[in-house]
Image: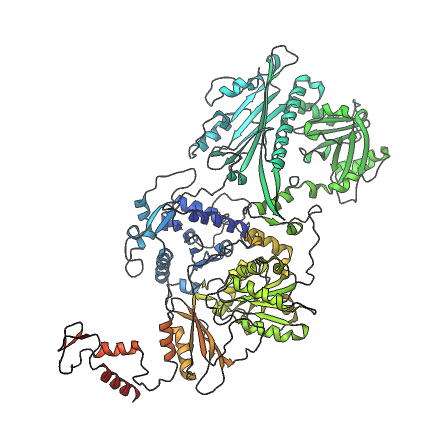
Amino acid sequence: MAGIRRVNGKLSGINPAVSCCRLRQVQSLLCEGGTATPDGILCSLGIDSRYNEGCTELAKYLFYGLYGRNQLNLDNVLDEFPEEMLDDVILLIKSECVHLYCNPMNYSYLLPYVSHWRNLHLYCMTEAEYEDEEAAEEFKISSFVTMVQDCYRIGVPYSSQGHIQRFDMFMVEKWPLIQAFALEGIGGGSFFTMKYKYFLALLLFVVKFTCAVINCIVINPQAFRCYYCHGLISSNITDKSKSQQPFVLFGKHSSLEDLESYSFNFPSESHQVRNTGPRGSTARHMILQCVAPKGPLACSRTYFFGTTHTPYLGEVLLVLSQMYSAAVQGVLSGIKCYSHTTTFTIAYLKSVFCISRIIPLSDEESRYVVKTASMTVHDIPDLQCDGGDLGSVVFSESFLESSINIQQKGTILIRLILIRMECLLIPQRKFDLHNKQVKSTGHCTCLGSALTVADAAYVFSSSQLSTPEEGKIVFFSEGLLFIHSQYGSITLSKDHISNIKFYDPDSSAVASLFVEYESSLLPHLPFPLHSSDQCLVFALQPRSKSHRAFYSRVRPKLHDSQEPPVAKRRGSLKTSYSQLPEQDMFLQHFALSSIGQEPILYDHLGVLFPSAELRNPVNSQGDKVVITIITGLPGSHKERLCNFLVQLNKEHGRWVVYQPGPDSCEGFSASHLQLYLSSFLESQRGPGAKPRLLVLSPGYTDVLDVVQAVLFHPDPVVQACFTIGAVTACVDPLTSCVEHRFAFPKLLEQCSQGIVSTVVFTGLTAEQKHPLMQHVQQLVRSANPTAAFTLAERGAVTRNEDVNLIFSDGSFNEPQMLRARYVLYPGWCKGRFFSGSGSLVLTQQRVAFNRPLERPLFVTRCKALKSSLKPSPFRGNVYNIWGKVRFSDSDQLMEVSYNTVSGSLSIVPDQSTDPLTPGTKETNTSCFLIFDGVGLTEDGLKDWLRLCAKQPKKTKNALSSQEIKRIHVSRHLDPLPPGYFYNGYQYVDIFGEKRNLHPSILFLVVIVCYRTSA
């Protein structure tokens, strides 16, 4: 675990969109169906799985940058706690939820990765609880038992990519974690393999690429062979074709015959420089292919030996470079053709995947993998030697594809391509000596006398093949000389220059010298610098020797110094070329396209891609009804906040509150909300300003379900009349956790990034340092880094700024919110994002009654609920009570609410007289209570209620059949009247008639009623 790194005290490189996308890739394996599909994928790290490689690789995939030793941009190694503490992780991934066990030490490092995961069940003790080592070990084992209790088939990522091992279930049985499962009292009480069926999970979703980057020439190809052969030791390559082997071939020994017969062990001199050039001379070029040893990704290039592309070196190098230039342009044209038309007839294209296989471009799977385009020109004839060949030139380029479906009355495909091409020209040592002589001499040359000494500068052109290249520039009286380590010497005399323009915005910026040249200079230029505008740009760094010398000695000889039009387009050198051309746009595009295949709405393009070409006018809300959504768990005081806001803003306009009625115990209903929106719109037809709508989501509801129900109403007319202004989540830290650090279902989903703009903390507002307050704020902040945090004790907002945040008209549609929704919740824009459900299911039971309750008994019974809470699996636990009752000491209807975890009890007079609130209205004087909890039954709740009321006098007519049956069971062996006998099952009289109840049951009932009423 030495790969954990931090930047400024925080983990670096964590992207919630990437983390969620990778989790969805894993969960997709669980949705395939069939007998081979597991119910969950188990991943245990460290000693608990005997350091299993497959589990470690899955952890590296999900927690990228956290586990592993070869991460990029890393700082100091964390030495805060032992490695076994970091490895103390158990992960069980199901199709709709995730179970994660960790300890308080590694919790803060895992949290940024998992806080955006949907339906997370977290098993983690507090720091104080974890100090008891025995209790911590028992908690770990019991957590594992709870994780797998609903599974039958469990998948295990047994082996890693590149090191496939035969799956052995008995080796898994030796894992310490699996052995602990059989412990009596703590574990499952039986052997794991006897209770569960588990098998190898083939995790084919991991995408890794090993790339060899060559920045220098290696004359001896043995280094390439060693690198490749070493990688083959742990690889699993199925393609043994020669095209997948590395090679270095020089001169005429790069012919088609040599390429086809090339092999690692061939005893020839094709890899030698000597005697492979024209007429037995030294080679003028070489071709090279470097192959990743653990996959078929390859890179092919042609290298030329010389200092410049000039006719003075002979026709050989000129012909070869022109052929290579044509091959490069052919490959790039093929990529461009593919990007526009999805055809690939210009050059040979293929897509490669990390697991050693080639995927046809026609397959949908190829969309997310690296593609390769290549072209080879074989057996180029030597025009100066009849019958001879110069060899071959080869070029291949890898590129990424990013395609997005744009929906606007149909589907439009937008595809972008990112490529990287570099042309290297290898200088020979003798030319380097010649360059040094040119730099040091002050005598007249073909360029005249030297005006400056050689100093650093950059050269580039408008060609796509060109990037700023650093070299040395020397100004002469009749031209200039640019010396580059790979391009060689580039000479520009006055005879080839048509115009010179100089642009220097200020003394602290890069100065640009624009040299327009004649077409006669093209043979003298490296082809990456060729451009249609026939212009080279030389950049001089501010306050450098070349910059000062240019002003003092060169500029006086120039008469045209003005700002060229092209300078406005290019901007400064550092900002324009610090990255690849169009890389910023591609990365923005790829961040969305790599998430999935869901479309993007055309109206959102201007916000997602802020460029002049895609910028769209912002759609005004016009006369749309603005909806403010308030969400929160039961006990979060969201109802109080809603009432407080409505009362506070009555003078600012009409308000309508949507809150499901007390009969809606089945949770959130999208159809009910949509039906209400339709009726609301119908009732508001006519003159006058439309009221604002405040939607209060019920219970344990995923806020994204509410958003999708509002935005994607089945009636397009109704849909166009509403817009969401802002979404606010209410959080009371005292009512947020079931036990330890396990939050109630949908707590984090109700604070989702990209949806919720404001989080209102309604409890512990006066105790900011309270451990529970700090824990919940850390959890919510990790799940939504951009939300505004406000304090409102029990829902009472006191600051105008907080009210404005909650009632904002546009925070929901801000660019950062919109982009977060697209990358975190693919399909949301069409209402197709599935939120799923967690492992803990809380249900609601509504119990109606007419009798008044005894206030002291009700309060006592409520307070006793907290001590009766059971640990996992939490069956029978009551967490919230809400309803309207009457007490025997008053005829007034009272609204009561109680939260078991916090112990908060509220009894206030009922004031729900707002006719605009939807839901079932109580048309009689009946009372009701709504209980939410786990595994609740109606009979059990009625028994609980009976203990809250004064027991009436019993009469035989008031007894239910169940009560009569209980009396019979308890008195069924009482003495029988004359003429009856009991056969062990039934009562039989002298006539043979049989009955199930005691013959004296009525007498027994009267006795019981008398004793009860006494």
Q: Please tell me which residue is depicted at 54% across the width and 77% down the height of the picture.
A: 912
Quadrant of residue 871 in the image?
bottom left
Q: Quadrant of the C terminus?
A: bottom left
Q: Compare residues 973 and 354 and report the one nearer the observer.
A: 973
Which residue sits furthest top? 386
The answer to whether residue 343 is above or below residue 38 is above
Q: Compare residues 414 and 308 and report the one nearer the observer.
A: 414
The answer to whether residue 592 is above or below residue 940 is above
Q: Where is residue 835 in the image (x, y as percent from the top left)?
A: 49, 56
Which residue sits furthest front? 991
Q: Compare residues 734 and 154 and report the one nearer the observer.
A: 154
Quadrant of residue 389 in the image?
top right
Q: Where is residue 233 in the image (x, y as percent from the top left)?
A: 42, 32
- Can I make out residue 37 in this image? yes
- Can I make out residue 766 in this image? no
Q: Where is residue 237 in the image (x, y as percent from the top left)?
A: 44, 32
In this rendering, would 517 be left or right of 347? right
Q: Compare residues 555 and 13 and report the one nearer the observer.
A: 13
Q: How is the image coloured?
A: rainbow
Q: Where is residue 370 in the image (x, y as percent from the top left)?
A: 54, 37
Q: Please tell me which residue is depicted at 51% across the width and 38% down the height of the picture.
A: 209
Which residue sits furthest bottom? 1014
